[in-house]
Image (cartoon, grey):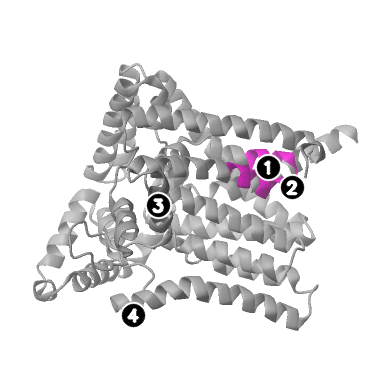
Amino acid sequence: MSLTGLSKSDRVFLLLWVGFAVFLAYFCHLLLAAMPDGFRAEQYYHDVAVNLLHHGVHSENREPPIAPSHLRVPLYPAVLAAAYAMLGERPATGVMINAALLAVTVGLAYLLGRRWGAASGWLAALAVALDPIQWVTSASNASDALFVTLVAAALVAAARIVDGDRRLGMIATCSALTALAALTRAHGIYLWLPVMAALVVAAWHYETKSRLAAMVGVFLAVQALLVGGWLLRNTVVMKDPRLVGMTSSHFITFMAPEIMARNEGISIAAARNKLVAELQATDAWKRAADAIEIERLRRDFALDYIRKHPDTVIVNTLRNIPDLFLSHAWEGTEVFAGPARLKATLDVSNRFSTATFETAGRARGLEARWAMVKETIARGMLSTLLYGIFVKAFNAGIVLAGIAGGLLLMTHATGSGRWNGVLLFVFCAMMTAIAALTFQGRFRMPIMPAAGALAGYALTWAWMRWRASRQA
C-alpha cells in the first residue's frame, strides 16, 4: 500500500515511528559510550552465541570441553550468533539488535490496536514507547526484546485470522510465531493455548468441520516441529525432556524465597540463604554426582516448599501485580544526562534493589521507595522522579482501562471484535499471572501492547458514549 492509501492517523504514526527509531539509535549511542556492554552485561547469551558461531554447539561453557547444554532456550543465542558473524562478537551488537526489535514492537503494537480505531493503535504503541523499562531492557544483551516482538507479531497474526484471514499459510505463520516465542523465553510456552482456542472459536460457525480440523492440524504440526524438535534434542542429548534446564534458578532464587519471606517475616535474602542451607544439608545433595542432578535437586526442593504453601503463593502473586506494572527503570531517562549522572542513578537504583531484598516484611518496599525518592531529590534528579511518577500513573491507567476495554469487548462487541477482545484479555490475564509469580518489572513488557490496545478501545467507547449523550 502506498503512503497515499494510508489514513491521516497512519501517516502521522509512521512519521513519529521513524522519529522513535532515531530516538532509540541516539539512546543506544549515548548508552554504549558510557557503558560499552549496555545494561545488564550478562554473559549467558553471549557465551552460547560464541559457542554456536565457532563450535556449532549450544553451550554456556567458556573453556573446553564445550559440552551441549539446555540451560537456555535456543532462539536468541542463535540470532545473536548470526549477528555476531556480521557485526562483531561484542555485547553491543546484541544491544543494537534489540533496539531495532523494540522499534518493530512499537509498530506491531499500533497494528494490533488499530483494528478498533486510531486511539487503540496509538495507546498500544505509547504503552510500549513511553516506558523506560522497555528501553533499558532492550538496551541489554538479553532475550526480552526478541520475545516481546515475537509475542506482538503472534497476536497481530492471530487477530488477522480471527478477522477472517484463515488461510492455512497464515495459520502456520501464527503458530510459528508462538512457537518461536516459546523458544526465546520459556514462559511463552503457554501462548499457543489461548491463540489456538481463539482461532477455533472464531471460525466455528464459518468453517466446515474438516476445515477446522485442518486448521488445528497445521497449527499443532508447526508447534510439534519447532518446540517438539527442541524437546527431542534435549531428550536425546541432555537426557532431559524439559524445554529449559535452568528452572531451578527461578524457583530457588526468586519464587520460593519470596514465599518463605512472607511466611516467616524475614527478608528475601535471608529466606534464600535459609533455603539453600537446608538443601545443602540433605543427604541427597551430598550424594549429587553431576550438574544435572544438582539442578533437579534445587528445583524439586524449591517446588516442594512452594506446594506446601498454596495460600501464600496466591497472596504473593496478587501483591506482586501492582509492582509488576508500576515499577520504573529510573536509569532509562538518565542516559541523556551524561555518564556521571547515569552512574549516580544506577547507584541509587542498585541500592534500592538491595534494600528491597534485604529488608523484612512488606514495609521493605515502602521504606526503600521513600529512601530512593529522598536521595533522588537530594542528587538533583527531579526530572527523573517526575517522569517516574508519570510512567507509574500512565501504566496504572493503561491497566485499569485495559481491564474495562476487555470486559466491554466481551460483553458489547460482536463477531471478530468480540473474539479478538477475548483473546487479548485472556492473554493479558495469563501472562500477568505467570509474571507475578515472581516479580520482575521487565516481565510486563509483552503484556503492554495488548493492554494498551484494550485500553484504547475503552477510551474510544467512553468518548463515543459521551458524544452521543451530548447530541441527544
Disc 1 to disc 2: CB gap under 8 Å: yes
Q: Which residue is mark 1?
A: 121
Q: Earlier in the sequence, mark 2 or mark 4?
A: 2
**Which SS class for mark 3?**
helix
How crowded pointer 2 is (Cα within 10 Å; few <14, some 14-19, many 20+) is rated as some
Whether residue 273 appears in this view of the structure is yes
**Label 3 is placed on what type of residue?**
Leu
Q: Say which residue appears at 71% left-offset and 58% top-offset.
A: 160
How many angstroms separate mark 3 from mark 4 (CA)?
A: 25 Å
How many angstroms separate mark 1 from mark 2 (CA)?
A: 8 Å
Task: Please tell me whether the stretch drawn in magenta is mainly helix, strand or loop.
Answer: helix
Q: Mark 2 vs mark 3: give the one in front.
A: 3
How crowded pointer 4 is (Cα within 10 Å; few <14, some 14-19, many 20+) is rated as few
On the image, which quarter does residue 231 sit in? bottom left
| Extent of the magenta region | 106-124
Query: Looking at the rendered structure, which numbered label has been put on residue 80?
Result: 3
Would you say 270 lies left or right of 197 here? left
Q: Say which residue appears at 32% left-offset and 67% top-offset.
A: 70
How many angstroms separate mark 2 from mark 3 (CA)?
A: 36 Å
**Label 4 is placed on what type of residue?**
Val
How many angstroms separate mark 2 from mark 4 (CA)?
A: 47 Å
Whether residue 401 appears in this view of the structure is no
Q: Quadrant of the N terminus?
A: top right
Q: Position of residue 118 (x, y in %)?
A: 73, 40
Query: Looking at the rendered structure, which numbered label has been put on residue 116?
Result: 2
**Which SS class for mark 1?**
helix
Q: Position of residue 388 (x, y in %)?
A: 45, 30
Query: Looking at the rendered structure, which numbered label has been put on residue 236?
Result: 4
Q: Mark 1 vs mark 4: give the one in front.
A: 4
How many angstroms separate mark 3 from mark 1 (CA)?
A: 30 Å
